[in-house]
Image: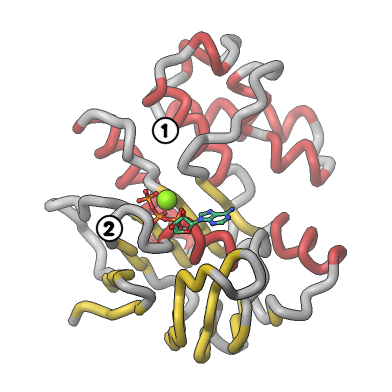
Amino acid sequence: MGSVIRAENLKLAYEKGKNVIINNASFTIEQGEFVFITGPSGSGKSTLLKSMYGKLRPHSGTLEVGGYNMSKIKRKQLLQLRRNLGIVFQDYKLINEWTVEKNVVLPLIITGYSLDVQRVQAEKLLSHVKLTEHAKKYPLELSGGEQQRVGVARALSKNPFLILADEPTGNLDEFSSGVVWDLLENACDQLNATVLVVTHKIPTIFNIPYRHFIIENGGIYEVH
Ligand SMILES: Nc1ncnc2c1ncn2[C@@H]1O[C@H](COP(=O)(O)OP(=O)(O)OP(=O)(O)O)[C@@H](O)[C@H]1O
Ligand SMILES: [Mg+2]
């Protein structure tokens, strides 16, 4: 299999090219790599992730994710791809009418896993993100940081081959951030997931090798 993500002369824009966000970016990311993406507010970090899960089609150039050409991907293929992605959204996107434990296993529910599998996985992940005692609560009964940890747990619930996380620790104190970094490190190191994380601050203690991309003024640069 080729690279997990391959971009060549990728251009991303809203409104049919008027508002160009990313211009002419080329890079490849291999299975099992961990990538931090930093850059100023409004530089296009979330936009880049959106293109990778098919929310925004490339304006021009090439973007391949998990072998799919994101310019041409069909609806059914996109659903298939998304089933195998773990996405952590900047604004969590939890279902407020569902309990925390049900939110965590949403990807398993969609795929039709049994209640037993759901229960085991929910228990394991909630313990990892230190939310066991909140399992039966609803998202709006949790703090912002706790909701964010639910979002991270949900992203990991199906052992995705690719994890796209937008500021997964943006709302967390030091302890909770540590919990989340450990989880993402583990997904990469133990499960060989490819992990892309947008963050404003790369953790000072990080135990596995990583790459660092900076997005600025429409360009994507790798820090070596
Ligand atoms: N749906 C949209 N339609 C048009 N323009 C948009 C849309 N979403 C974002 N933009 C614009 O694209 C640019 C990049 O936005 P993006 O959300 O990718 O930035 P970001 O790097 O994630 O910033 P932050 O660190 O604040 O989250 C901004 O100028 C923003 O106004
Ligand atoms: Mg953003």
Characterize the local packing of mark 1: few (<14), some (14-19) or many (20 or more) Cα atoms within 10 angstroms: some
Q: Quadrant of residue 216?
A: bottom left
**Three-letter amino acid code at the position of disc 1:** His
Residue 31 in percent (x, y) is at 49, 76
Residue at the extreme front of the image, as rendered: 18
- Tell me the CA gap for discs 2 and 1: 31 Å
Q: Quadrant of residue 35?
A: bottom left
Residue, disc 2: 40
Q: Secondary structure at mark 2?
A: loop
Query: Mark 1 near ligand 2 (CB under 8 Å)?
Result: no
Q: Secondary structure at mark 1?
A: helix
Residue, disc 1: 128
Q: Nearer the viewer, mark 2 or mark 1?
A: 2
In this orientation, which residue lies closer to the viewer: 189 or 102? 102
Q: Say which residue appears at 27% left-offset and 58% top-offset.
A: 40
Q: Say which residue appears at 47% left-offset and 25% top-offset.
A: 147
